[in-house]
Image (cartoon, rainbow, N blue to C red):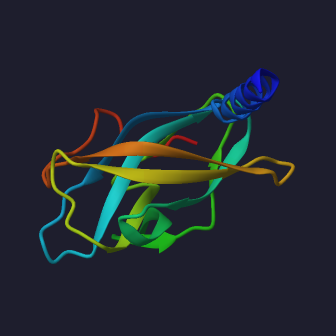
Amino acid sequence: MKKNSYALLALYALASSAFAQVKVDAPWARATVPVQKASGAFMQLRSAKDVRLVGASSPVAGSVEMHKMEMRGDQMKMQQVDSIALPAGQAVNLASGAYHLMLIDLKRQLKAGDSVPLTLIVEHPNKRRESMTIDVPVKPLNFTGPPGAHTAAH
């Protein structure tokens, strides 16, 4: 019995340390008004190895999409993307006006002070995928994020 417990603990530690190579800093989601069905989630990601963010999900949303904001001519446009590169050792900001996550078809209002679970899925160059779930604090509608988090670093 003890051997099985130790084996499970060792396996869990190995799996956790593999994903621990992606660090998440300053996550937050924007609060919503009662009838609003979408919101954004923002954070800074840093990976020890080259990986790609290939998906996300949350029980508070029907879907979570990865989006990119960019200037086209004199207009800011938003488009969905399939993945976001996380180059080894480089900070990638998911921020308003850049790459970010959209929580679509919200199942409830997001209120400032609440926290929502968000699962991130990364893919390694060998196509192996891993996921991690983080708790994302909900910030007020007028919150702008940490200084320097308004653009994406690549």
Residue at the spot 51% in from the left edge and 71% down from the top edge: 80
Counting from the top left corner in percent of width and height, residue 131 is at 63, 49
The answer to whether 14 appears left or right of 21 in the picture is: right
Counting from the top left corner in percent of width and height, residue 93 is at 46, 42
* 88, above or below 65, in the image: above
The answer to whether 70 appears left or right of 60 in the picture is: right
Q: Nearer the viewer, residue 104 or 80?
A: 104
Q: Quadrant of residue 44?
A: top left
Q: Nearer the viewer, residue 110 or 81?
A: 110
Residue at the spot 15% in from the left edge and 78% down from the top edge: 35
Is residue 101 visible in the rendered structure shown here? yes
The answer to whether 131 appears left or right of 107 in the picture is: right
Q: Nearer the viewer, residue 39 or 68?
A: 39
Residue at the spot 76% in from the left edge and 21% down from the top edge: 2
Residue at the spot 38% in from the left edge and 43% down from the top edge: 135
* 92, above or below 64, in the image: above
The answer to whether 15 appears left or right of 80 in the picture is: right
Counting from the top left corner in percent of width and height, residue 91 is at 54, 34
Q: Quadrant of residue 90?
A: top right
Q: Quadrant of residue 26?
A: top left
Q: Nearer the viewer, residue 3 or 133?
A: 3
Counting from the top left corner in percent of width and height, residue 121 is at 62, 53
Is residue 95 visible in the rendered structure shown here? no
